[in-house]
Image: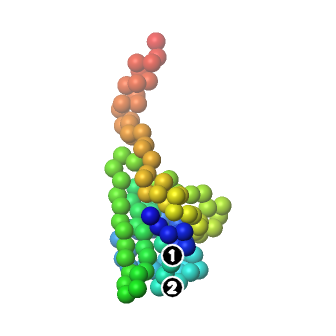
Amino acid sequence: MIPAVVRIFVCTEPVDMRQGFDRLMLAAREKTQHDPQGGGALFVFANRGATRIKVLWFERNGCCILYKRLHRAVFELPVSGGSASVHIDSAALARLLAGTARAPKRSRRSRQELEARASP
């Protein structure tokens, strides 16, 4: 469980998941206007497809990253209202990390077959 005093910021713009500690710390600083090394905050970043997520935080003597990849699901990011980041609570973070199942993508051929079967 994450303590209530921890601030959680979700970056609403997609991030290249190849970025490591330093580039994510810079992105966190730019998008949220908070210093990641100040402690007491988690910074959440997702890729364009919302299938991968990184959570960055700073402990006493170093930076940590949690990296999660979903299969057949996506992360439901909060709506930003035009801002670069959104502040959420620990319950919203738990829901975000759980992901949401998505319908499997159908190929063009399978859609055409379904349409052909549906027409008389």
**Amino acid type indicated by mark 2:** Gly
Image location of residue 113, percent across then percent down:
37, 25
Q: Is residue 10 above or below residue 39?
A: above
**Residue in the image at 53% along x and 66% along y:** 10
Image location of residue 107, percent across then percent down:
36, 37
Instruction: Report crowding for label 2: few under 14, some 14 to 19, many 20 or more residues within 10 A (C-alpha).
Output: few
* Residue to which mark 2 is pinned: 38
Q: Which numbered tag is attached to residue 85?
A: none
Instruction: Look at the image and tell me whether residue 11 can be seen.
Output: no
State the scheme by which the image is colored.
rainbow
Considering the image in quadrants, where does the N terminus appear?
bottom left
Q: Is residue 42 above or below residue 99?
A: below
**87 or 116: nearer the viewer:** 87
**Residue in the image at 52% along x and 73% along y:** 6
Q: Secondary structure at mark 2?
A: helix
How many labels sit on residues? 2
Q: CA distance from mark 1 to mark 2?
A: 8 Å
Image location of residue 111, percent across then percent down:
40, 30
* Residue to which mark 1 is pinned: 41
Instruction: Report crowding for label 1: few under 14, some 14 to 19, many 20 or more residues within 10 A (C-alpha).
Output: some
Q: Secondary structure at mark 1?
A: strand
**Amino acid type indicated by mark 1:** Ala
Q: Is residue 106 above or below residue 34?
A: above
**Residue in the image at 56% along x and 57% along y:** 78
Instruction: Look at the image and tell me whether residue 76 can be seen.
Output: yes
**23 or 55: nearer the viewer:** 55
**5 or 31: nearer the viewer:** 5
State yes or no: discs 1 and 2 in contact (Cβ < 8 Å): yes
**94 or 74: nearer the viewer:** 94
**Residue in the image at 34% along x and 58% along y:** 69
Image location of residue 42, percent across then percent down:
48, 72
Instruction: Report which quarter residue 32 is drawn in.
Output: bottom right
